[in-house]
Image (spheres, helix red, strand yellow):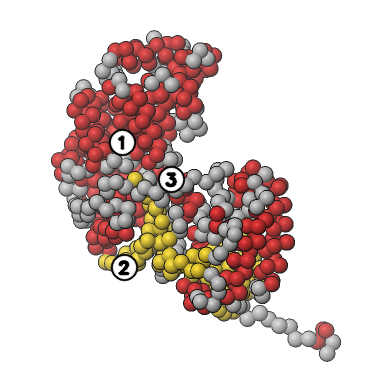
Amino acid sequence: MPDDDKPILVSAGPQRRLAVILAADVAGYSRLMESDEEGTHERLQTMLRDVVRPTVEGHKGRIFKTAGDGFLAEFASAIEAVRCAVDLQQAIGERNKDVAQDRRLAFRMGINLGDVLADQEDVFGDGVNVAARLESMAEPGGVLISHSVHEHVDRKLPMHFVDQGECALKNIARPVRIFRVTWESADPVSSVRVTGSDAEPELPQVASIAVLPFATLNSDADQEYFAEGLAEDLITDLSKVHGLLVIARHSSFAYRDRSLDLRTIASELGVRYLVEGSVRRASARVRINAQLIDASNASCLWAERLDRDLADVFALQDEVVAKVIGALGHALPTAKPLPKRRVTDLEAYDLFVRGRALSTQSLRETRAARPLLARAIEIDPGFAGAHAWLAMSHHFDALYYGEDADEHRAAARAAAARAVEIDPENADAHIVLGYLRAYEGEFEAGVAEFEEGLRLNPNHSAGWAHLADLRVFEGRPTEAVECAENSFRLNPYPPGDHYSFLGWAQYAAGRYQDAVETLRHPQAGGPGSKRNLAAALAQLGRTAEAREAGREFLSEFPNFSARQWGRTQPFRDDADRQHFIDGYIKAGLPE
């Protein structure tokens, strides 16, 4: 038949089939590219050409997609896929022997057997997604496999398969049981470690945890508020557990849109354990998929899907906290169950979640928070958290914006006092009330209130930052620096005022160069940053720089007077007050 007469074959569209998918990518690739873009790209292409492709093809597989720093391959046999992954890791490890640690290409790999959609040369679907999720959890040089793969390879290969338990994978409906593959090697590739720095810090062995933002299955703003609110409440509750170090929301939520493997996230946050999951709220039901991961070995300590009536959401939160604490029993043998939460009205809770999210942001947003929190209190007058965050909103307005400051301080104090009256265990309320009392002439009582708040919640990063402020006024600058540094440990990516408090404490301690470096950080913010930067530069004798920083400060605060400022500050010792005044005057600020 002539070519023109051949029948035209029309694709029937994507076809479903079972396939084994191997997903792999290079750990720390962004760092490698940043330090040597051309060299890293060339080494990776050479690795793909000389090692990866021949090995995949030798195990009867095919690479169907490459994307910058990784690849996806399809196999008909689970045994061949696992053999291929191990052979690749051993070959790559061998090549890395003579390469400097900070230039090594180390792959993470995940393998899954599942139903996929095949369309011409491409393959996609949950079968592929699970493999990709496993890859993101693997250690550099390591291999994770799903339970479906394990069933086909167990006892058929000269390898060990370490059960990591069931894990809830992002955007995957059911938890997946995971196994870590280990094998004998004279130079185990699992020892290859790559992170964002030249040498990966060991994950802490102490009980330290971060709660990542819960995912939602759509972009509905209501769903996102609700999911973030649940995660933030979990952070607050875990923060009260004795002996557990908990990373602040501001830092853990920074990973909302970042696709990093969990071990890298844990390393960057300086924690051993991570909580992640997803939330789905539909009609009168709420479903939480949550898991607790030990990032030191990528094992899943606890995972569960909790499906409840929406009216039971508060009991559900308590249940999640209790199960996380229970799963950490080996690290927290003396941990006790937390008291049950007091709020019970779902509408009040929704308003509270929205108001809390806005309370310490920009001026417009912190003011937009107040009617939401006021409405929550109207619905449930006994909602201590709403009173505490209403106080926080007024306090934030008075502290940073200055308009009607006395009015906002009075409103903040009344709301904080009411919160403490309702719930003496509310740390936020104690901290706000303590700060206000200290600044209003009740210094010792204010500090005691502050310390009570930190006793109730020793993981309150903002509390430690503000306590640094009060320690300076007490004439205890060394302790002030320690408090500020503790706030950074709890909040590695803090808001700008944390830098301001640390720089203020460093200046008080006479550590002027440290203060300059802190206050020149790009994230440093708050009214005191430029003022104290000017003073620190002046004390170092860098007069021109000091006067430039002083001019920048005066452009925002033209009516500033050093001595008038000093009269409004609650220093216990006049010499400490004069130390700051002298620095400001040396920097050219008005006396």
Question: Mark 1 belongs to which amino acid?
Answer: Gly
Q: Quadrant of the C terminus?
A: top left
- In the figure, residue 576 lies in which quadrant? top left
**Camera-side residue: 357 or 134?**
134
Determine the residue positioned at 61% across, 78% down: 76
Is residue 257 found left or right of 97 in the rendered image?
A: left
**Camera-side residue: 479 or 421?**
479
Question: Mark 2 belongs to which amino acid?
Answer: Asp
Is residue 234 found left or right of 23 in the rendered image?
A: left
Q: Position of residue 535 (x, y in %)?
A: 44, 17
Q: Position of residue 548 (x, y in %)?
A: 52, 17
Q: For residue 270, which numbered disc appears in the image? A: 3
Q: Which is more foreground, mark 3 or mark 1?
A: 3
- In the figure, residue 3 lies in which quadrant? bottom right
Determine the residue positioned at 80% across, 87% down: 5
Earlier in the chain: of badge 3 and badge 1, it is 3
Earlier in the chain: of badge 2 and badge 3, it is 3
Write down the residue under mark 2: 307
Q: Residues within 10 Å of mark 1 (few under 14, many from 20)?
A: many
